[in-house]
Image (spheres, rainbow, N blue to C red):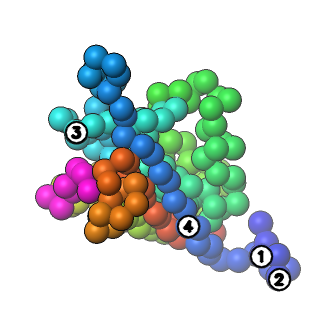
Amino acid sequence: MTDTAHSTPVPFRVGQAIDVHAFAVADECGNLPDKTLMLACLEWPGETPLEGHSDGDVAAHAVCDAILAATGLGEMGSVFGTSRPEWSGASGEQFLVEVCRMARKAGWHIGNATVQVIGTKPRMAARLPEACQRMSEIVGAPVSVSATTTDGLGFTGRGDGLAATAVALVVRAQ
C-alpha cells in the first residue's frame, strides 16, 4: 500500500474510529436478554448488556475499526456485517484476533491503540488496568483503555448506551 500523495510506501499509518451500542431493553415481562455485558473484552456481571449483532463490546469494536482504518482493510460493517451470519454473537475478542491476523497478513504490525469508553455505567475506574492488560494481550501490542462521561448529555449521559472512540498506530512489517 502506498500513500496516495507519494509513490513510496509509508512506514506507519494511524486509524481512528467510533462505535456505539444501546443497552438492551427489558421485554414486556421486565426480562433482559440472557447475556452478560462485555466491555473491553471483560465480563461485567450484573450490568445491563449491550444490543448488537455480536456481543456489542464498543471498546473492542472501536479498536478493530481503528486498526482496519489504519491498514486500509475496510471497517467492521464490511468485514463482519450482519450479512455474515458466522459472526453473529461473536465476541469482541474474536473480532480483535481476526482483525490483527488480517493486519499481519497485509504486512502491518500494530504499534499501539488507545480507546476511550463514553458512558455513565458501568463504573470502569477500578477495572481499567485489567482492561488494558486483557486487550493488550489479545492485540499483541499496548492498548490503553480509559473512560469518561458526558456530564449527563446525550444518549450516553442518559444511560441509554455506550460509545467508544479509538486510535490505532500500525507500522509496516520489515
Amino acid type indicated by mark 3 = Glu
Q: Mark 2–mark 4 contact, CB under 8 Å?
A: no
Crowd around label 3: few <14 · some 14–19 · many ≥20 (10 Å): some
Q: CA distance from mark 3 to mark 4?
A: 28 Å
Q: Nearer the viewer, mark 3 or mark 4?
A: 3
In the rendered image, the vertical position of residue 146 relative to residue 137, given as above or below: below
Name the disc covering residue 47, or none.
3
Determine whether the residue tagged by mark 3 lies in a helix, strand or loop. loop
Q: CA distance from mark 1 to mark 2?
A: 5 Å
| Mark 3 or mark 4: whose residue is earlier in sequence | 4
**Left or right of 171: which side holds 46?**
left
Q: CA distance from mark 4 to mark 1?
A: 17 Å
Magenta region, residue range: 119-126
| Mark 2 or mark 4: whose residue is earlier in sequence | 2
Q: CA distance from mark 2 to mark 3?
A: 49 Å
Q: Mark 3–mark 1 contact, CB under 8 Å?
A: no
Q: Please tell me how many numbered marks the rendered image carries.
A: 4
> Which of 71 and 18 lies nearest the eye of the viewer?
18
Q: Is residue 162 visible?
A: yes
In the rendered image, the vertical position of residue 169 relative to residue 118, given as above or below: below
> Which of 146 and 133 lies nearest the eye of the viewer?
146
* Residue under label 2: 6
Question: Where does residue 75 sit, x and y in percent of width and height?
Answer: 64, 51
> Which of 103 and 144 lies nearest the eye of the viewer?
144
Question: Where does residue 137 sit, x and y in percent of width and height?
Answer: 34, 52
Determine whether the residue tagged by mark 2 lies in a helix, strand or loop. loop
